[in-house]
Image: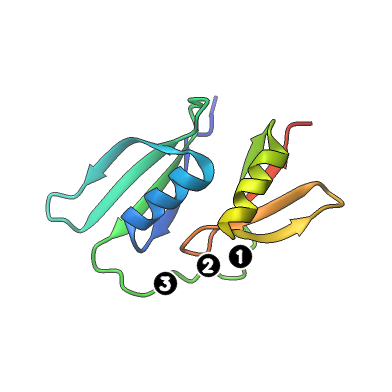
Amino acid sequence: MLTFNHFNFNVLNMARSLTFYKEALNLTPQREKRAADGSYHIVFLQDEAGSPFSLELTELRDREQPYDLGEGEFHLAFRTPDYDAVHEKHQKMGIICFENPKMGIYFIEDPDGYWIEIVPVR
């Protein structure tokens, strides 16, 4: 049997990304790894519920250019029972990049251009 474990986003600035994910989604570092030679820094983030699935952020020391996210046809999704409150928070933060009121969903964009879908508990 296989189960989901984690999903990775490569980031240009770990400190900036950690701040974003804490403020926007209340994700907190669960564990981290650093290369002995400093070539990479990995942080695994966990949600408030303590689910076994985590978001892995990877910062490569020598990376200077933004990552090419292609056509951006992938995303990570979060579900919330407090959809209206979370939407208001994200609206105030100015991070909503797309809304589909008919479907009752919206997306936020992280500092590296990754889209994150927010859906209500139904």
Question: How far is mark 2 from mark 3, CA to CA?
Answer: 9 Å
**Quick check: 4 above or below 41?**
above
Quickly name the residue at label 1: 72
Q: Residue 69 carries which label?
A: 2
Q: If the image is split into quadrants, where does the N terminus sit?
A: top right
Check disc 3: other Cα within 10 Å, few if <14, some if 14-19, many if 20+.
Answer: few
Task: Name the residue: 18% across, 50% down.
Answer: 35
Residue at 48% over, 25% down: 50
Tell me if residue 58 comes above or below residue 31 in the rendering. below
The amino acid type, in three-letter code, at marker 3 is Pro
The residue labelled by disc 3 is: 66
Residue at 67% of width from left, 39% of height from top? Answer: 85
Q: Where is residue 103 in the image (x, y as percent from the top left)?
A: 83, 49
Front one among 11 and 81: 81
Q: Is residue 17 left or right of residue 63?
A: right
Q: Earlier in the sequence, mark 1 or mark 3?
A: 3
Q: What element carries label 2?
A: loop
The answer to whether residue 75 is seen in the rendering is no
For the residue labelled by badge 1, is the local secondary structure a helix, a strand or a loop?
A: loop
